[in-house]
Image (cartoon, rainbow, N blue to C red):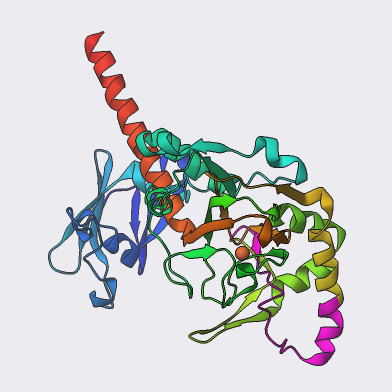
Amino acid sequence: MSASVQLEKNGLTLALSGGASAYFNYFWLRENCDTAIDKQILERVYHVARAPEDLHAVKAEIEGDSLVVRWSEGDHTSRYPLAWLEKCAQNALREDEAELTRTLWRGDYYPKLQRFDYARLQTEPSQVADWAKTLITDGISLVQAVPNTDEALKDMVHLLGHVDPSCFGYDFQVRVHSDPSNIAYTTSALGLHTDLPSESPPPSVQFLHCRANESEGGESLFVDTCAVAEDFRSKNPQDFELLCKVDVPFRQIHKNFDMRDKHKMILLDRKGEVSGVSLSQHLVDVMDLPQKQLDDFYPAFRRFIHALEDPAYLMQFRLEAGECIVFDNNRVAHGRNAFKAQTGLRHLHGCYLNLSEVRSTYRILKAREQDKDKSKDNRVSKAA
Ligand SMILES: [Fe+2]
């Protein structure tokens, strides 16, 4: 055994550079052996639950820049680069390039709304990477010069991932329906809401491709609920805490579906920052909190709705034919003004996509960009 490695009952302690040391559990080490991952499939093929209960290292030493461990099971030896172990000890192994800080926006955001050109997105991966980044940071973007075809919507989604179906199927048509299954399919005004909190999970990215907008009225409304809720947290901390805790029941029922789920009104991410809201007055089911608790809930809920409706947060504009607004459905509350169907056609073609696919695409495209830069550097240094 090397002097810089101490074997213990359930793990080993390793001396790191700079005089620090770190403890590593045997099961953790064993399942992170290089051979535990299939080289082609890139998934773990070793199952730690199949290891003997007393799995331990019989020998561990430093060889060059690696820790080499011989195991009590199967005459197996593992080799771990010390630099990799140090990163793990500092919890810095998986720095996630897709974990980007949100840029909160308010009612004056429209001129800064990031715009992307449909044709460039089809041919330039760097544009797709910028688009994905914008969806993660700003939660909203506008694609322009979108062809007036049924396929255009799917073609945009496929640049980032796959269509995520809902109770409406793979896509939906927002226009006046003769037998509407929700208020969006009428000419009524739609208050600020997030789509389908009745589903588990609710859809996360929404695409609305404007095929025609010739009616009087029907302006689109968008609010960054993260901006509202973070301000609300500082002004009304007790209300904020309550709305982060209480499960609100949602239900959407029609002839062929009966979707139900409960969600917190204000959603927090792992860091405790607001990631969005569950908001649909049309779909709130009969509140089933104890009635006395409702004495606190309704005033808090009403104050939060009034905050959301503060014009300072409202971005209102007219979506034009050939534009597609793409937004994080759980973060950006949306709505529309009423319109007059007799003055012209208003037709949006919509669908959903999971935000985790946007993050995944962003990581992949960034990695490809970096690989390209590296091979460019190599060519430059070879030529030099
Ligand atoms: Fe909606």
The correct choice, above or below, for 91 with respect to 283 in the image is: above
The residue at the point 48 percent across, 45 percent down is 132
Q: Which span is picked out in magenta?
A: 270-298
Relative placement, left or right, of 229 versus 53 is right
The residue at the point 52 percent across, 48 percent down is 99
Query: Where does residue 261 sit, x and y in percent of width and height?
Result: 57, 81
Farthest residue to the front: give it: 342
The correct choice, above or below, for 146 with respect to 68 in the image is: above
The correct choice, above or below, for 50 with respect to 40 in the image is: below
Relative placement, left or right, of 39 versus 216 is left
Query: Where does residue 121 sit, x and y in percent of width and height?
Result: 42, 38
Query: Where does residue 4 sit, x and y in percent of width and height?
Result: 35, 47
The foreground one among 111 and 263 is 111
Q: Is residue 3 magenta?
A: no
Work out whether residue 334 can be spotted: no
The foreground one among 381 and 358 is 358
Picture quadrant of ligand 1: bottom right
Farthest residue to the left: give it: 75
